[in-house]
Image (cartoon, rainbow, N blue to C red):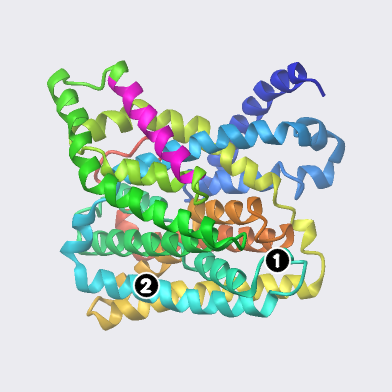
């Protein structure tokens, strides 16, 4: 297929992806599920799991292998911009306000699932069905542990916001625990990626460069970037030149962390965390937020779905393994976080809600899994098993929360732009 043919096909791919995501979203909304769940499922539906199984020729025509590189590149731009927005929303003050409970819940949500994940990684390592031959036992254990430990913080934040619980004890604790939980899981993943490849100099560059970049951006970089905030306050809005500067910095941050072999999303997230708050934050979210979440981000979900083939889970043993992973994941996150919240004096109802929210993995899990697949840490079969776990744990969050707090099904605050998680 020529470059011209790929270019023509790409526009049809985008139209098809957006249409399927919207239609799936209509069904998901009627079932009380957020758009992110619809997009996760849409990716599986139009991938080899369903469309490729029922109509393989159509699926191969629509998403030929030659087009995957284009789809991947564009999806990475959307992912970097989305993580930049998440960084803008990261509020360290939440952790400070509920320090003891947040750290306890977060620690339980990291330590228990991480230990269970390491056990799964150790048990499965050595089989080419799950891990690549070049991945060591330590890397397999650490990667699986990090994958089991992640929380869908953006989705958690959306549920809390839409239900009007942002300033409540439950909302503050859930957001604080979720944000610190994800920060720890990403640090573990960074160590895994830095070590993968076996060359100590690359590991040193990745770890040293990543720490150096984060420290610089969150200290001196934050002060320098304050100029952007002052300029926006002066203008009263985010002008095109100021937006261009901000986006340039995001891309440079993403390039730097990708170059030192961590991953682009780290650079984009840290850049967002270092950016000014106030009017600058609101304007960035207003200008690019809806475009990123409704146009670019679905491409990442579809790309993940195209790498997911449920037909790879083709034996009772593999289905039992999938069930076991789901149970371990739910026990490690949901039950552990519930217990930690109860030990810190939270009510049983709020503790269950926190456990359900922390157990959802959503987009963050897919990011980790795609990194592992791209870097050759895991194999497609294990990728598929973990994607199924991510979907199931994410599906369970909203119904449990709505059952416990029916009066908050419709929040008192105005909804965030559709697609923001």
In the displayed structure, would residue 170 be above or below residue 410?
Answer: below
Q: Quadrant of the C terminus?
A: top left
Q: Secondary structure at mark 1?
A: loop
Query: Foreground residue, 326 or 38?
Result: 326
Tell me which corner region of the image, top left, top right, bottom left or bottom right, holds residue 7.
Answer: top right
Q: Is residue 25 magenta?
A: no
Q: Position of residue 100 (x, y in %)?
A: 21, 73
In the displayed structure, would residue 81 be above or below residue 11?
Answer: below
Q: Is residue 243 magenta?
A: yes
Work out which residue is located at the far right of the displayed protein and give it: 57
Q: Position of residue 382 (x, y in %)?
A: 69, 63
Tell me which corner region of the image, top left, top right, bottom left or bottom right, holds residue 400.
Answer: bottom left
Q: Position of residue 119 (x, y in %)?
A: 58, 80
Q: Are marks 2 and 1 in contact (CB under 8 Å)?
A: no
Q: Which residue is painted at 72% across and 63% down in the image?
A: 132
Q: Which residue is painted at 50% across and 62% down in the image?
A: 396
Q: Secondary structure at mark 2?
A: helix
Horizontal arrangement in the rendering, residue 236 relative to residue 192 (left or right)? left
Q: Quadrant of the N terminus?
A: top right
Query: Foreground residue, 247 or 54?
Result: 247
Q: If you read the primary sequence from the N terminus, does the residue marked by circle 2 or circle 1 appear first?
A: 1
CA–CA distance in space, label 2 to label 1:
34 Å
Residue placed under numbered mark 1 in the picture: 131
Task: Tell me where the magenta segment starts and ends, as one range.
Answer: 242-258
Residue placed under numbered mark 2 in the picture: 352
Let me know if residue 410 appears in the view.
no
Q: Position of residue 153 (x, y in %)?
A: 39, 55
- Of the two numbered discs 2 and 1 in the rendering, the one whose residue sits closer to the viewer: 1
Tell me which corner region of the image, top left, top right, bottom left or bottom right, holds residue 221.
Answer: top left
| Prevailing SS of the magenta stretch | helix
């Amino acid at each position: 297929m020529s470059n011209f043919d790929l270019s023509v096909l790409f526009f049809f791919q985008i139209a098809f992806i957006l249409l399927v995501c919207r239609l799936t979203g209509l069904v998901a909304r009627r079932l009380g599920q957020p758009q992110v769940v619809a997009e996760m499922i849409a990716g599986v539906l139009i991938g080899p799991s369903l469309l490729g199984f029922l109509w393989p020729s159509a699926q191969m025509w629509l998403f030929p292998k030659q087009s995957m590189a284009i789809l991947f590149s564009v999806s990475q731009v959307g992912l970097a911009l989305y993580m930049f927005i998440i960084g803008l929303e990261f509020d360290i003050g939440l952790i400070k306000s509920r320090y003891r409970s947040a750290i306890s819940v977060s620690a339980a949500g990291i330590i228990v699932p991480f230990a269970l994940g390491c056990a799964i990684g150790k048990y499965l390592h050595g089989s080419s069905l799950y891990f690549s031959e070049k991945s060591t036992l330590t890397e397999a254990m650490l990667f699986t542990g990090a994958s089991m430990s992640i929380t869908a913080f953006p989705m958690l934040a959306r549920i809390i916001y839409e239900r009007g619980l942002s300033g409540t004890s439950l909302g503050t604790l859930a957001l604080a625990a979720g944000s610190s939980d994800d920060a720890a899981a990403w640090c573990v993943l960074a160590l895994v990626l830095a070590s993968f490849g076996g060359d100590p100099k690359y590991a040193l560059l990745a770890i040293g460069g990543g720490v150096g970049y984060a420290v610089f951006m969150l200290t001196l970089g934050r002060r320098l970037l304050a100029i952007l905030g002052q300029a926006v306050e002066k203008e009263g809005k985010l002008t095109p030149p100021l937006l261009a500067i901000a986006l340039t910095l995001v891309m440079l941050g993403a390039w730097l962390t990708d170059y030192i072999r961590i991953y682009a999303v780290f650079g984009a997230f840290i850049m967002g965390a270092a950016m000014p708050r106030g009017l600058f934050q609101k304007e960035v979210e207003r200008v690019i937020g809806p475009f990123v979440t409704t146009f670019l981000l679905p491409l990442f979900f579809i790309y993940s779905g195209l790498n997911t083939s449920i037909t790879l889970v083709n034996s009772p043993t593999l289905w039992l393994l999938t069930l076991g992973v789901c149970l371990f994941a739910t026990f490690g996150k949901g039950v552990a976080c519930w217990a930690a919240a109860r030990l810190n004096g939270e009510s049983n109802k709020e503790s269950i809600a926190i456990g359900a929210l922390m157990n959802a993995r959503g987009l963050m899990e897919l990011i980790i899994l795609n990194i592992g697949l791209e870097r050759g840490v895991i194999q497609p079969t294990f990728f598929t098993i973990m994607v199924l776990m991510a979907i199931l744990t994410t599906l369970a969050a909203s119904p449990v929360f709505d059952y416990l707090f029916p009066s908050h099904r419709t929040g008192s605050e105005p909804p965030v732009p559709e697609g923001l998680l």
